[in-house]
Amino acid sequence: MKILLAEDTKDLNKVVTQMLEMQGFDVDSAFDGEEALKLALSNGYDGIVLDIMMPKLSGLQVLKEIRSRNILTPVLMLTAKAEVDDRVEGLDAGADDYLTKPFAMKELMARVKALTRRGSQYAAKELSFGDLTLKSESLELIASNTVRLSIKEFSLMQTLLLNQEHEVDNNYLIEHVWNDEKDASEETVWLYVNFLQGKLSYVDSNVEIKGHKGGPFRVVINE
Amino acid sequence: MEDSIYGNHREAMIDVMNIIMGSIDELRANMTEEHGSDPVEHCLARIKSEESMREKCRRQGLPETTESALEVIHDAIGIRVVCAFISDVYRVRDHLKAMDKVEVIEEKDYIKHAKPNGYRSLHLILKYDNKYYVEIQLRTISMDTWAALEHHIHYKKEVGEQDKLIIAELKRCADELASTDMSMQTIRDMIRNDI
């Protein structure tokens, strides 16, 4: 599980990073809003911890920007006690949880675990990209025509759409789509990418999955 | 005995039907040699029966004449080609369109654009030698399965609450079969191209 931590106070950043790593998370640390946004757009994360008060871009601006780009990764905001309006605005802008400073490290760890357990999968009933719509309740893949996907095909399509801003590598897919099943391999991923490529062309969509056997993969819109 | 609605054209119509079937057989033989598998699962051809042609004329408010049967109505000669895979459907279509003396009158791709009820098929109306219309339906085995089973289920096509559910569920079946169809083709392609 991979976490993005954005916190400009160096000491706090360091302590939280170490604690998260001790819990078994991979952590990318950012020290300002701009860096956080850049990382969020170029990698897939299982959770993001965002401080509200940061230089260059505030946590709220980062949150609004990533949500506007269809990135549904669960987000926990860190706010100061006085910032009630910020907390409300954060939740309205798509934050999943918040914690006020100062906080107990134990509580932050528990909340991050809860956040990543929930996952982002259930957040969106419908994902759109180009002329394509993916519906989570019916597993329908829709463009000018409709097909019903299998669970794994759906989950792979969803993961690629949620990471539309950047490439996704094989390991990430094996971890998130196949839950690290021991039979899942590069071959498995490649077969399912091929299934989806076939189905995208069958529904006559302008969306395509780019990538070769072994990954990485990315969805693109053909104009 | 009443004169045939087809006048004295029946034999010429059978000839046209046989020429097209023969050409499909040729393609099958060539593709079998090239890939080791026959793209066509089965093929049916028929001249619409005297009775159903007259019934169709009446239904459409046309006089029961040879002109109605051969010029206005286009399915006096009908051929259904059931293919193994989706890509085979398009191979057969391309072959038919490129045949000598064949003019394409109409092409409707209900595979790329399925009907709202889920029906999938590729419909061609050809005119052979500037004389006879031929209606051709091309589809895969699983599209054919759906169409055949749907035909067996006698449900009302008007819209009550119960019917809406049935129509939606039949469409779901069609979309699931379509998905499986594409998966089977992907597997075939993977093996063939060793990707």
Image (cartoon, coloured by chain):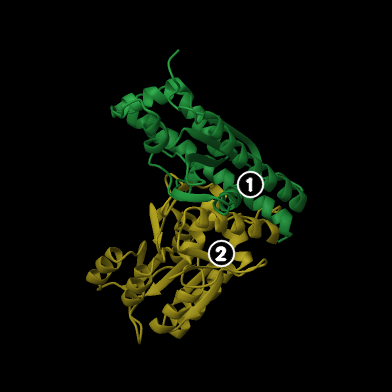
Image vertical order of residue A204 relative to residue A82, above or below: above
Of the 4 image quadrants, the one containing the N terminus of chain A is bottom right
Q: Nearer the viewer, residue A218 or A35?
A: A218
- Amino acid at the residue labelled 1: Met
| Tag 2 residue | A1
Q: Quadrant of residue A58?
A: bottom left
Residue B49 at x, y percent in the picture: 48, 23
Viewer can see residue A109: no
Q: Nearer the viewer, residue A30 or B62?
A: B62
Q: Colour of chain B?
A: green
| Tag 1 residue | B184
Residue in the picture at 30% in, 68% down? A90
Residue B44's mark?
A: none
Q: Nearer the viewer, residue B16 or B120?
A: B16
Question: Tag 2's secondary structure?
Answer: loop
Q: Residue furthest bottom?
A: A56
Question: Tag 1's secondary structure?
Answer: helix
Q: Colour of chain A?
A: yellow
Q: Nearer the viewer, residue A106 or A49?
A: A49
Image vertical order of residue A189 relative to residue B156, above or below: below
B81 relative position to B5: left or right: right
Q: Residue furthest front?
A: B8
Q: Mark 2 falls within which chain?
A: A
